[in-house]
Image: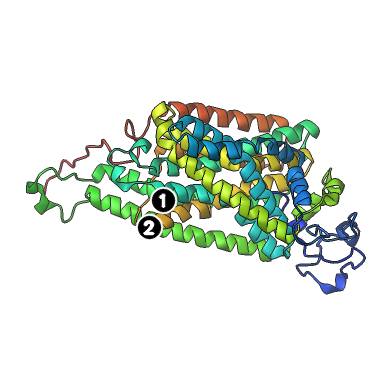
Amino acid sequence: MSGHQGGHSNGVQGPATNSVSPSHGAHESTSLLPTAVGRLPLLSNGVAHEGESGRSGFHLRHFLRVLWKSSCTVSMLVNVLWPFVPAALVLHFVAPAAHLWIFALSYIAMVPAANLLGFAGQEFARKMPKVAGILIETTFGSIVEIILFIVLIVKHEPEGEDEGNGDEGNLIPIIQAAILGSILTNLLLCLGLCFFFGGLRQTTQKFHAIVSETGSGLLLVAAFGLLIPSAFYSALKPETVLVFSSNTLHALHDKLTEAKLRADILKISQASSIVLMVAFFLYIWYCASSQHSIFDEVIEQDEHGDADREADLAKEKFTMTETFVALFISLVFVTLLLIFLVDEIEHVVAFGVPDQFLGLILLPLVEKAAEHLTAIDEAWDGVINVALYHCLGPSIQTALFNGPLVVTVGWAIGKPMDLNFEIFMIGLLVLSILVVGNFLRDGESNWLEGALLVIVYIIIAIAAWYYPNPDVATTNDFNGLQYVTARQA
């Protein structure tokens, strides 16, 4: 998610003098805070709704000014990277053989393009009623990741599976690493930086238990669903029988063969993906409909204590037309740049960057960069509950929706992908969730906890750099394994 959450999309429209009466009950447009706190201050243009611009249509000068200021100071500084966007586009068409330069420029250009997409999604969400705003902001917060996963699975070449390497067209190891890498980047790097910078300004920051409990609980459920196929495979792989000659065929009707286990893993992954996506929609429905969920009282109260709330309210906003223009422009740039990045993956791997490092570290860093900057800015301003949810929320969406989505897309286009992850990555995910859950248990954070989470992430990055590519070593795949049962029928 980008920008502030549901408190911005509170559905109160019209002048600030039209305050909502308590007799209206707990309606979507009714603030759960006391009237004195929940009353929206007048903007300079006299409009109370936080998403209204006071203008209509499209005005280029205003559009560029709002785009430049973005959602916060850090996001505004990111906009200085916009020259890399046309540079990457031009280089791709003018010098297509400059593979590493194209990858590098596209990688940097992704940051301002994703920043604009997140900001435009936030502006759009602010103009919607609360429930719609939550769903829209959730979608646009992870749309870069969804596009990345879909581009990867579309570019994947199944016939390269025998080689098991990204430079042979098999992108499944990179997709799997990117799924878990996205979760780890949010849980360790982003959350750690939020705790660290927030702790520098305030010795201790306290967050609401409902944010940490809901987030860590859902992450455990999501991790359980993601790791079932890997556990299933690990338990049964010693019992598999490889067919070496026709003499063994008569005894295989009641044996677990390599092909059968592969097929079972794929079916389990596809069925689990559907169930996980259902769980995600249930989670969204609960958060959007519950009047006392994290999208209401906790987040809204946190935002009213924002250190720069007055400045944020006074900022110029996009009109609805300008919002659609910004969404269109950012989606085009993000899609093109991600296609360029994926096209150059085989050359980057050939240059010496390991598959696991590329998927686990490099890709999640760039597709989450703008969102992480926003979360860190919120933690610095003391809006720790919002910042915390911007770390846990995307992790939950990746595990419950984005990851399963790429499995179902591959299923639909005839490029099967399973959730049989490397044991190395499984261990990283489980340990990371346990570490973060332990830090969240006491309901408060400080700069030391943040620094420790970042250190854990750095250690993982170092290990990922030295982890061999799947064609060299694999811990949870059939490549290179020669398991044969001693018992013969």
Kindly identify the residue that appears in the image at 83 percent across and 49 percent down.
Answer: 315
Q: Spot the residue most to the front.
A: 94
**Marks 1 and 2 close (CB-CB < 8 Å):** yes
Residue situated in front as seen by the camera: 443 or 61: 61
What is the tally of numbered marks visible in this picture?
2
- Residue 138's disc number: none
Decide if residue 187 is in sight here. Answer: no
Q: Amino acid at mark 2?
A: Ile
391 sits to left or right of 349: right
- Among numbered discs 1 and 2, the one appearing first in the sequence: 1
Q: Spot the residue most to the left.
A: 247
Asked where in the image residue 343 lies, by quadrant, the reply is: top left
- Residue 154's disc number: 1
* Residue annotated with mark 2: 413
Decide if residue 265 is in sight here. Answer: yes
Crowdedness of circle 1 by 10 Å Cα count: few (<14), some, many (20+)? some
Kindly identify the residue that appears in the image at 52 percent across and 55 percent down.
Answer: 401
114 sits to left or right of 71: left
92 sits to left or right of 322: left
> Residue 438: where, in percent of width, then height?
62, 39
State how far apart marks 1 and 2 are (Cα).
8 Å
SS for callout 2: loop
> Residue 336: where, in percent of width, then height?
52, 46
117 over 447 or under it: above or below: below
408 sits to left or right of 444: left
Q: Amino acid at mark 1?
A: Val
> Residue 307: where, in percent of width, then height?
84, 43
> Residue 461: where, in percent of width, then height?
52, 30
Crowdedness of circle 2 by 10 Å Cα count: few (<14), some, many (20+)? few
